[in-house]
Amino acid sequence: MKIVDLTVIPADDRTAVAAIAAEAQVNFKDCYQCGKCSAGCPMVQGMDLMPREVIRYLQLGKVQEVLNSKTPWVCAQCGVCTARCPQNVDICATMRAVRHAAKDAGITPVREADVFEDEFIKNVRAHGRSNEQYLAMKYNLRSGHLMQDVDSAPAMFARGMIGIATHNIDSRDEVSALIDRVLQNNGAAKEAPKGGDAS
Amino acid sequence: MSRIGVFICYCGSNIAGTVDVEKVAEVARTLPNVVHAETNKYTCSDPGQAGVKAAIEKYNIDRVVMGTCSPRMHELTWRKLLADTPVNPYMLEVANLREQCSWVHKDKEVGTAKAIDLIKMAVAKVDKLSPLKSTQIPVTKRALVVGGGIAGMQAALDIADAGYQVTVVERETSLGGKMVMLDKTFPTMDCSACICTPKMSEVGSHPNITVKSYAEVESVEGYVGNFDVTIREKAKYIDYNLCTGCGACTTKCPTKVINNFEQGMSARPAIYKMFAQAVPAKPVIDAEHCRKIQENKCGACAKICPTGAIHYDDEDKVTTERYGAIVLTTGYQLIDWKPLYPEYGGGKYPDVITGLQFERLVNASGPTEGHILRPSDGKEPKNVVIIKCVGSRDPHKGVAYCSRACCMYGAKHAHQFLDKVPDGRCFVFYMDVRTPGKGYDEFYMNTLQDGAQYLRGRVSKIYKEGDRLVCLGEDTLTSAQIRIEADMVVLETAMVPAEGVDKLGSMLGVTRDKDLWLTEAHAKLRPVETNTAGVFLAGVAQGPKDIPDTVCQAGAAASKVIGLLNHDHLESNPQISRVNEALCQGDGACVNICPYHAITLVQKQFRENSQKITRTVASVNPGLCQGCGACTVTCRAGAMDLLGYTNESLMREVDALCQW
């Protein structure tokens, strides 16, 4: 159990919350803590904070609790929470933004999720689309789970579901530029925070 | 020999579905003194009633049993019917064959047997009834309103506008009550004084309204339509006919007394007007603190008064007047939280204040002219903690009920603070947020957008660290213990009944609930009436509520009063208690049990064994008695009898059930 001192919210924490709010385009004051997001979340079993609690800590300005939480990394980005929220709070986008903020701060509470996201983007840049056997190989190497799913490989290979061919598309540069643009937009949003200040 | 007619109703299939109505009638014909029994498909319909009248005439019937629906439904219908016949309307007994028989049974045999029993009992009882006559009670067309807050003012204005004379008795020196102390009113945030003071002056200047300020009800005698009320107007030491309200006297008085209107946050002179817009707009002398009256020194006010209006030898004025109806609008006070919550400092921290103190702090006419400043050092607080449910919903320390208005004025206080101190932060500790009014939840949501940080939990302790107040609470939404260093703490404390209302209630026979709120006659269907005929209630006196609900209730109470005063006479209910003086021992058990104060003990002369003797016997006031029957079961000697429900007639019912 923890003690939370609300007497002063450090300026850094306030800025961090505002940046998350800006990236996610969410006003955390809108949330009235009904818990409908957490009630319908299919991933809660792997989470250490309920999605509702993530928003609650952001309301309280306690950004460290959120940056160190597994929850945003376990989030599958399915969007059920956002679709069902009565106050129109984009919880799904908040999880994304928290993940970015944590990574910027060098915090990756679920290393596998971080590795996978990294390798996935690299993979799409390299091939112009997802190439599953290379993604699986790279992920296994970097995550250290060397033998994960290896037992299914022969059967998949026999059926032609995986192979040596790279299946690269022609306009790989354009896909890569697209990814750059998306990442840049996130950065731009972070620099121009609007609303959602925690205090 | 009585001649009883029995009329049994099918009520379509309502009764006939489970009761063999014809068989019941057949049995009824065999009962003693029954001269006629008949059935009808719908007795309450016009042809049904005509049939009853015809039968009464044809068989020369002198008392009637109606085997129909509940007397709650149609007893009055049958009384009206009998009033058109030679039969006395009270020579009637209704056997409830529907609600208490056919509707609760499925088996026709069982239903029929029970219906027969009910008819037997009714026949046995009606045989022993005697004719009763209601008398006419005159109505004094004036109303008394006790309490000059927003409820009392609204009720007084509504009654006065209908053309009746109204007297408003106010304990304080001015009208206005609690509302006039408030700064703004939720959810519209209109200025409380701006909507309250015009009502005050309207009441003060209404040709049909007399305001008795600085006055209290001392005693009440009489009954509906004719209450003799004794009112004590405390000595004001100022002749209001001469006083111009110039206020020169209040500037010269050297005494300083704690100002209760400002919730103890400033001082006032001993000669004072409660506040600038007070009605009546004239001062009074607080005799307890006046040097002239206490020590025969000073006299500065009399010297400066240009009209010579000040008289130090003034005395209380006691008057008795008659009123037809009384409205109780005695309002509330805030619970004295200090002895109850030592964990909040128990009053030793001046910066732990009540909601009403906050109202005065934020009010432009308050002690700080609307600047929110800490009482301790006059600094502007930056971190403010608001704690709701202090006293409320705390059966161990305070009261069990919810005070209803605090969630909204708590949100209002947060909003006002954040508005006036833009760099301030406001934390609201709550257990629930209850905002069930028009525009209320929207107001709360806006307060969240203003930046108020709501924390779900009660504060456990407040202690001092430096010049700050550390509040320890929980936020149950994160299961975290919360620590906040606050500059000021506002306690939204429970509403409790105004002092003295218990005494006033017993004076009038108006019951109080376990928390001493005045009790309405029926929680749903008679919300502004009391159990005492002619006495009505409105506003927080009945239970915590906000201003809109209070004004609604005041209007409702006024309409009931107008309805009553509209009559020249009232028909009295003749089904009241009667004393058999030969049996009465004068022990007064009935006096104590009577909830309406209708019975008194009197000395009466009797002739016994050819000697004149004086004995103490009970005497029933027919205007006050409501016919509840409590005295009849209390009387050990059996001297009390409820007319229409006499002991003999009830015993006959039991006999009929057991023996016939």
Image (spheres, rainbow, N blue to C red):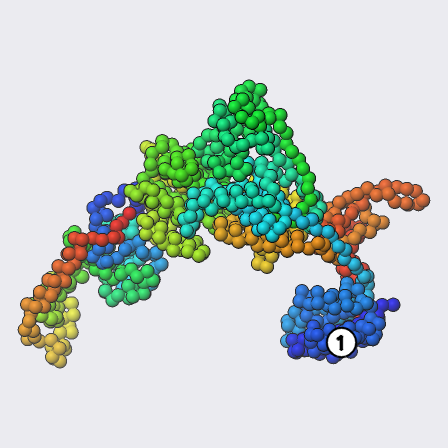
Q: Residue at x 13, y 59 (%)?
A: A184
Quarter of the view holding residue B63: bottom right
Task: Tell which residue pokes out farthest to the right in this image.
Answer: B610
- Drawn side of residue B391 relative to residue B425, left or right: right
* Foreground residue among A161 and B336: B336
Q: Residue at x 48, y 38 (%)?
A: B277
Inspect this view and state whether residue B414 appears. Answer: yes
In percent of width and height, residue A175 lies at 9, 68
* Foreground residue among A164 and B406: B406
- Mark 1: amino acid: Gly
Task: Tell which residue pokes out farthest to the top in this image.
Answer: B297
Quarter of the view holding residue B439: bottom left
Is B353 rendered above or below residue B28? above
In percent of width and height, residue B70 lies at 68, 67
- Drawn side of residue B76 relative to residue B195, left or right: right
Is B64 rendered above or below residue B300? below
Q: Residue at x 34, y 56 (%)?
A: A33
| Picture quarter with the C terminus of chain B | bottom right
| Picture quarter with the N terminus of chain B | bottom right
In percent of width and height, residue A174 lies at 7, 68
Q: Residue at x 47, y 46 (%)?
A: B195
Residue pointed to by mark 1: B51
Inspect this view and state whether residue A41 appears. Answer: no
